[in-house]
Image: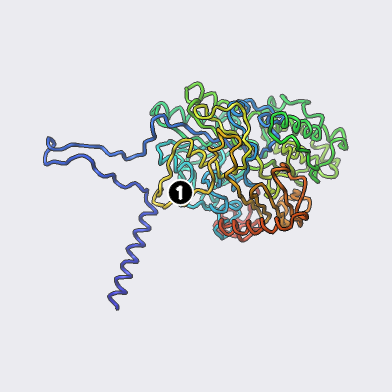
């Protein structure tokens, strides 16, 4: 008996050490030698093994572009009034996806995008900076759920990330590391961008990192989006000079258009006077343009205005002056972001790479950022005279490093046309319904056609893998891989009327939740409010049911008419919630992670 116990203990120790060794080591087993070894060189047939993955001949490049905090109705590519010629170019020569969804916050969206799994499934139900000690919220991406960069690198790609990452725990972002969950630890050969734990940063004189090292500030004081575009071009240029046949994956995620809205004044002045008619006029104009372009159903009406927005005609003249200039500033920021992205696209065309490049343009990681009372903008019931006087005095400094501007809720609502509410609203389309474009000249003969099948941020990875013929290894870096949870959109490319395949999707943020299933959507706002005081729902104690096939922007609540459907969908949500680590519903904004608390010394940031 003692001998049996001893054998079991030894076996346990052996397996434990074996497991530790495998999971901490690079999974790169020595390939079987296929030559012949003799006693002499003359008798030997040498053969070099293919140690590193080799991409197929003419494998396509991949570029993902993710814009921050922007609404469905902001850009000209989707009917808005902010000029975005680079976005227009991709949309007009690709496919517009008009029923694509994100989470209601940036970090969960990015975690889901990069892994192809639901946000809570990869431990990002909220922010890593405000984590909670359960699998859905601890803010540590599992290695068993590889990122797209890890997968494509295993398929012979060079991989680059530029801009905003936001899925590294703050407790890991020190000189002491560990660095395995930095971008370069999750499949990216190189990273250039903000501190990988942060969600927002200034556009001038930004604190930037290259790989895992803090970089000196730009001596020329250039705008950060220009620096990001320069770096993206440099990465590709250096790769192609050394190995022209090797494909690349570029994840380009600038800070635009997250607050602060900062940009050079010449971009702001391009829009001088163009928004003087106000946000009510903007909504009406944009909805008409969207119908003309086929981006919304023809029966769509404008929803009731958000309760935090005053009618434009009730504003004082000085209030209108301030509000219009804040929108001009935001529009200039959007157009500048588009311009820098256009430089990357132009470079790909000039080098002959564009034809064989799959570009996924995601215009928004969530809906627009609604203003809050603390922003002291033209909003709510009135603007205090002393605040208004200060705003008028500082109009000329908008967009500079001395300013930290947002825009009024009226403009946030307008650029979210035709949806209600904002970022932070998982229960409403205004928080989760964004614009997306697929562009791939070699495979997609698109001319701006619309695809209206329901889709979600997790679908981008499997779509990319299918269009590039990339294979997902069963083991990556020693970790057995769990299934991808998104559904490829490749089926819809040549078949606009194909039935949608993503038929069920939950949404949850800070205790508010919703479920889409077979064209129906149920929503439970659950009484939560934004930490910055912004209004999130009209009645957060209510239940909302919409037939999304007939009611594109959630105007007609059918909850009282179809209580059985509400019950059915709530039960379906509960099943999804248990499956993907959504429980417990997290309604606390402070982290319980002792390492993060120590890192911030108790002063938690708001992103």
Report which quarter residue 271 is drawn in.
top right
Task: Measuring from the top left, give residue 540's x and y in whole percent.
Answer: 76, 55
The quarter of the picture where the N terminus appears is bottom left
Query: Is 413 left, or right, of 235 in this rendering?
Result: right
Task: Measuring from the top left, give residue 532's x and y in whole percent.
Answer: 72, 50
Query: Is 313 left, or right, of 155 in this rendering?
Result: right
Task: Measuring from the top left, give residue 377's x and y in whole percent.
Answer: 78, 41
Residue located beneath label 1 in the image: 180
Q: Is residue 128 visible?
A: no
Report which quarter residue 494 is drawn in.
top right
Kindly state the secondary structure of the residue where label 1 is placed: loop
In the image, what residue occupies the spot 79% across and 44% down? 306
Q: Nearer the viewer, residue 488 or 306?
A: 488
Report which quarter residue 407 is drawn in.
top right
Task: Measuring from the top left, give residue 135's x and y in whole percent.
Answer: 54, 58
Image position of 249 with respect to 118: above or below:
above
Image position of 213 with respect to 335: above or below:
below
Image position of 77 with respect to 562: above or below:
above
């Amino acid at each position: 008996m003692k001998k049996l116990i001893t054998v079991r203990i030894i076996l346990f120790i052996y397996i434990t050490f074996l497991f530790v060794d495998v999971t901490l080591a690079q999974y790169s087993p020595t390939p079987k030698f296929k030559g012949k070894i003799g006693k002499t060189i003359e008798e030997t047939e040498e053969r070099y093994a293919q140690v590193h993955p080799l991409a197929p001949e003419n494998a396509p490049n991949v570029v993902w572009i993710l814009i921050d905090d922007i609404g469905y109705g902001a850009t000209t590519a989707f009917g808005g009034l902010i000029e975005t010629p680079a976005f227009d170019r991709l949309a007009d020569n690709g496919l517009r996806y008009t029923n694509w969804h994100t989470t209601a916050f940036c970090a969960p969206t990015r975690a889901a995008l990069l892994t192809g799994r639901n946000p809570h499934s990869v431990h990002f139900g909220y922010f890593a900076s405000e984590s909670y000690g359960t699998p859905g919220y601890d803010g540590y991406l599992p290695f068993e759920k590889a990122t797209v960069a890890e997968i494509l690198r295993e398929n012979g790609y060079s991989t680059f990330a530029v801009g905003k990452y936001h899925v590294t725990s703050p407790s890991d972002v020190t000189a002491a590391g560990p660095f395995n969950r930095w971008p370069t630890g999750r499949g990216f050969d190189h990273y250039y961008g903000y501190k990988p734990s942060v969600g927002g940063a200034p556009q001038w004189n930004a604190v930037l990192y290259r790989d895992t090292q803090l970089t000196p500030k730009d001596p020329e004081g250039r705008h950060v989006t220009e620096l990001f575009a320069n770096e993206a071009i440099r990465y590709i240029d250096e790769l192609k000079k050394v190995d022209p046949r090797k494909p690349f994956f570029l994840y380009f995620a600038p800070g635009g258009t997250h607050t602060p809205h900062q940009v050079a004044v010449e971009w702001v002045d391009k829009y001088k006077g163009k928004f003087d008619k106000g946000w009510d006029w903007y909504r009406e104009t944009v909805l008409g343009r969207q119908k003309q372009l086929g981006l919304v159903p023809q029966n769509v009406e404008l929803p009731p205005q958000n309760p935090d927005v005053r009618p434009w005609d009730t504003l004082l003249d000085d209030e209108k002056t301030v509000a219009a200039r804040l929108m001009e500033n935001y529009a200039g920021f959007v157009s500048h972001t588009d311009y820098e992205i256009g430089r990357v696209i132009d470079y790909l065309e000039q080098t002959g790479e564009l034809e064989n490049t799959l570009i996924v343009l995601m215009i928004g990681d969530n809906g627009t950022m609604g203003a809050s009372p603390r922003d002291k903008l033209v909003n709510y019931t009135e603007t205090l005279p002393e605040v208004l006087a200060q705003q008028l005095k500082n109009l000329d400094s908008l967009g500079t490093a001395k300013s930290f501007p947002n825009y009024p809720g009226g403009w946030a609502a307008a650029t979210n046309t035709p949806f209600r509410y904002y970022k932070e609203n998982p229960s409403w389309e205004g928080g989760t319904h964004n614009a997306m474009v697929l562009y791939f000249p070699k495979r997609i003969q698109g001319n701006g056609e619309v695809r209206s099948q329901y889709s979600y941020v997790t679908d981008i990875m499997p779509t990319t893998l299918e269009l590039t013929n990339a294979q997902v290894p069963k083991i990556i870096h020693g970790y057995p891989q769990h299934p991808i949870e998104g559904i490829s959109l490749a089926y819809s490319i040549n078949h606009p009327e194909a039935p949608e395949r993503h038929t069920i999707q939950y949404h949850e943020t800070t205790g508010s939740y919703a479920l889409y299933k077979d064209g129906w959507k149920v929503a439970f706002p659950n009484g939560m409010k934004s930490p910055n005081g912004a209004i999130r729902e009209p009645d957060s104690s209510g239940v909302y049911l919409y037939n999304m096939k007939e009611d594109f922007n959630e105007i007609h609540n059918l909850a009282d008419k179809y209580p059985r459907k509400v019950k059915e969908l709530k039960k379906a949500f509960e099943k999804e919630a248990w499956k993907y680590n959504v429980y417990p519903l997290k309604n606390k904004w402070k982290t319980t992670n002792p390492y993060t608390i120590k890192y911030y010394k108790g002063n938690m940031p708001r992103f």
